[in-house]
Image (spheres, rainbow, N blue to C red):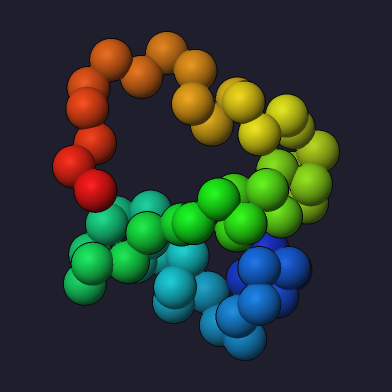
Amino acid sequence: MKLANAIGHDSVGHIAKAELHSFGKKFNLDQLYKISKVLQVDIAEFFRDHEEVIDI
């Protein structure tokens, strides 16, 4: 719930849907930045070692 609140949501539903890319939900760069701060990781870690192209 802390993570959902940190990116401006009052439930974990958006996070779950974005993780599964269901209902067209996805994270924007601002949300990824906030998530990286909560998790205390560099935002670049979210983009490392991804070989497949994501259709946006």
Residue positioned 71% across, 55% down in the render: 34
User: Is 26 rendered above or below residue 41?
Assistant: below
Q: Is residue 25 visible?
A: yes
Q: Quadrant of residue 36?
A: top right
Extreme bottom residue here? 10
Residue positioned 24% across, 36% down in the render: 54
Q: Is residue 41 left or right of residue 44?
A: right
Q: Is residue 35 visible?
A: no
14 or 29: nearer the eye? 29
How many numbered badges does the structure rendering display?
A: 0
User: Is 2 rendered above or below residue 38?
Assistant: below
| x, y percent for residue 22 | 22, 64
| x, y percent for residue 46 | 54, 31
| x, y percent for residue 9 | 60, 80
User: Is 3 rendered above or below residue 8?
Assistant: above
Image quadrant for the N terminus?
A: bottom right
| x, y percent for residue 19 | 38, 53
User: Is 10 rendered above or below residue 35?
Assistant: below
Q: Quadrant of residue 14?
A: bottom left
